[in-house]
Amino acid sequence: MNLLKSEFLKLAYQRRTWGLFAAAIFLSVLATALTPWALSRMKNAVVMPLTLTSSVDGVYSKSLGAYILALVLGIVIMSSEFQHHTAIATFLAAPKRLSVLGAKLITAAIWGAVLNVVATGLGMVSGAIALSMYKDAAKPDSYIFVDYIASAALTGAVLALVGLAIGTLIRNQNAAVSVGLVFFLVVDRILGLVWTEGGKYLPSGLITSMMQLHIDVNIKSTGLRINTADYLDPLPAAALMFGYGIAFALISLITLSRDID
Amino acid sequence: MISIEFKGLVKRYKDLTAVDGLNASIESGRITGFLGPNGAGKSTALRCLLGLAAATDGEALIEGKPYSHLTTPLAKVGAVLDSSGFNGALTGAQNLKVICAASGLNPNRIPELLELVELGQAANKRTKGYSLGMKQRLSLAAALLGDPDILVLDEPANGLDPVGIAWLRQFLRTQADAGKTVLVSSHQLAEMQHTVDDVIIINHGKLIAAGPIGDVTRNPADPSGAAQSLEDAFMRLIGVSK
């Protein structure tokens, strides 16, 4: 409990934490609020007209787009210990490293979930406000709000755990954040396109599954096709996502055997 | 009473042996200087003592136990190891609150300790704006949070001005007179001569000399048995001619 309080204080005292919250909210609100406007401006809006429930659900799904910042938060939790050399003070105060790591994992999961839930919640509010300006917009499916919030909590928690593991393995904070972002924003996406059978098992595929979206995106100009219809069901996807978190948490155990500089 | 013991401590990094079979004991109620040239293995030995580095062989004990086995470590041992060990985005007081929370200590002493190390005015400033001397003072405040019986200080005078060094000397003496154990490593031999009761000198990771400063500084080549300065004795013992 002492360590949890300490980890909580470390995050609460730092402006960077609140900066990440602000950035997540900004991204989520902006993406969700602008999507109806963007759809209404598209000449071929027949693809996703706002009169369809699935289109409106798709608008609200944009509120989940800031999950990557939960990953960054997890990276920052661990790598800032090494950046500021505060790992020394931490392990002097609490020499049982397994306890310290456990506290960090719990803290990362909670803060990651809260960050993503707050951003998603506010994103959905902004989406509702934006959609209210379109009188012919359909009503969303009633279950999506609970689903998206639950998905945001799970995704935020797991990605923060993954981030923590990355921050443990790569002690340079800038390098750790770069690796995390490049993997999730570039490598993951490319793998999903190239390895179509396995894309559903990658983080972005799992996140899509958890949102229960089954949208066909057909990009005719490139011939690329991502069919999410055969993606995992939300619960298996959530279980696998949680499995990723556990696997990365186990990897972060490597810190237990390292000397502290 | 022996507070700290190094028992055949060995620490190797691949091909480099940083500490090579160190045996030494430090008594309570005394200030012990831990001396050696750069790279002698002092900091490594202290890190092994404090559980930050794993010993390759042997052990380093605090009142008979490894550091990691202490119930409330900060209430037993206060350490100053690295003056940069604070989160620059947090204020001095916030950094100390985080440490208190981690170790279950009451944060009520923080204002008093910040005044003690003369950082009362800077308590709410972010530590990234602290000078080296201020960080060193904050490290000392952190070491005192648990009112420990043992102080382990690695180069505590780094960054302190002459007034600060004089203050530190008086402070360490007060702690030792109160029955506490003070182990302090330093390169400032002239200053150490005025501060310590006992010395432990290591070179290339090996113990060169240990004992009361009067015994260690006595020059065996001088028939009168007069004591050398600590600096001269140090040079003689590590085999460097001045």
Image: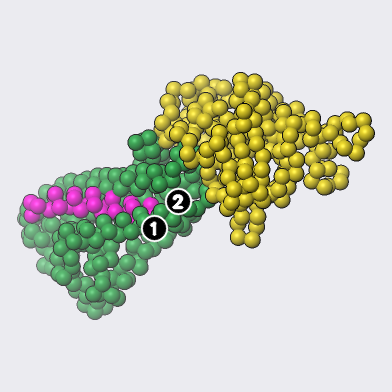
Q: Chain B is drawn in which colour?
A: yellow
Looking at the rendered structure, the number of numbered marks drawn on it comes to: 2
- Judge whether B139 appears above or below A134 on screen: above
Question: Could you say where residue A225 lies in the image, as x and y percent from the top left?
Answer: 22, 75
- Judge whether B142 appears above or below A212 on screen: above
Crowd class of label 2 (few under 14; some 14 to 19; many from 20; radius 10 Å):
few
Quickly name the residue at label 1. A251
User: Which three-letter amino acid code belongs to the residue tagged 2?
Assistant: Leu
Query: Is A138 placed left or right of B211 in the picture?
Result: left
Give the mark, 1 or 2, whose residue is nearer the N terminus.
Answer: 1
- Judge whether B12 appears above or below A19 on screen: below
The chosen color scheme is by chain
Quickly name the residue at label 2. A256
Q: Do labels 1 and 2 share a chain?
A: yes
Q: Which chain is green?
A: A
Between residue A23 and residue A51, name the one nearer to us. A23
Between residue A33 and residue A157, name the one nearer to us. A157
Question: Could you say where residue A228 lies in the image, as x and y percent from the top left?
Answer: 18, 69
- Quarter location, residue A246: bottom left
User: Which three-letter amino acid code belongs to the residue tagged 1?
Assistant: Ile
**Which residue appears farthest toward the right when viewing the image?**
B223
